[in-house]
Amino acid sequence: MSDKRSNLTVTHKWELEYPKTEEAYLVPKSNWNHLRKRVERIKSPTTIFLTIGSVLLGVAGTAFIGALTLPDVEGYKSLVCWAVFAVAFVCGGFSLFLHRHQRKQETNVKTDIIECIDEIEEKYPKHRETNA
């Protein structure tokens, strides 16, 4: 028998795709860090919902104490105090709920911006280490 080797050649064509080129801004590192710090320092302003809710809950507390302690005058005292308590308590609670919801949305926006900045920085790991 003869020791002849057979050659097997496999070819495969690869199609490489390149990202589209786009315009970009060169931002100095000091400006980038300044922008990041300013975004991190964003604080939500106190909204009117917090003030209104606090006042209404104070009114509800006063009406509740009044309903329990004031003497009954012609039978209307307890009805009026309990009605004021119920309306003020519900409206105050709803106002605080709206405040909480609005603050949560503002916090989510800030968090989304910080995450976007982090994603951009992750593209440049060499420069991230020197980011101070």
Image: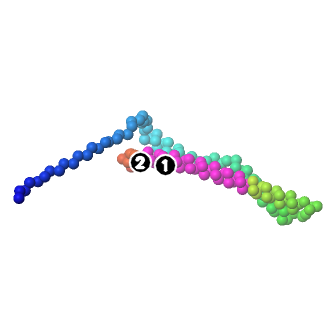
Say above or below: 62 vs 111. below
Q: Which residue is labeled 1 in the image? A: 115
Range shown magenta: 92-120
Horizontally, residue 26 falls left or right of residue 57, namely left
Does 23 appear in magenta? no
Mark 2 packing: few (<14 Cα in 10 Å), some, or many (20+)?
few
Is 84 or 40 nearer to us in this picture?
84
Q: Percent position (x, y) of residue 10?
A: 21, 48
> Residue at point 44% right, 47% down?
119
Q: Residue furthest top?
A: 23
Q: Please report whichever mark, 1 or 2, sits nearer to the chain's N-terminal start.
A: 1
Q: Which residue is labeled 2 in the image? A: 122
Cα separation between marks 1 and 2: 10 Å
**Which of the image's four quarters has the N terminus?**
bottom left
Does 110 appear in magenta? yes
Residue 123 visible, this orientation: yes
Q: Given the image, on which type of amino acid does mark 1 rest? A: Glu
Say above or below: 24 vs 94. above
Q: Given the image, on which type of amino acid does mark 2 rest? A: Glu
Residue 40 visible, this orientation: no
> How was this image coloured?
rainbow
Secondary structure category for the residue under label 2: helix
Q: Is label 1 in contact with label 2 (beta carbons under 8 Å)?
A: no
* Residue 87 quadrant: bottom right
> Residue at point 87% right, 62% down?
78
Q: Percent position (x, y) of residue 108?
A: 56, 50
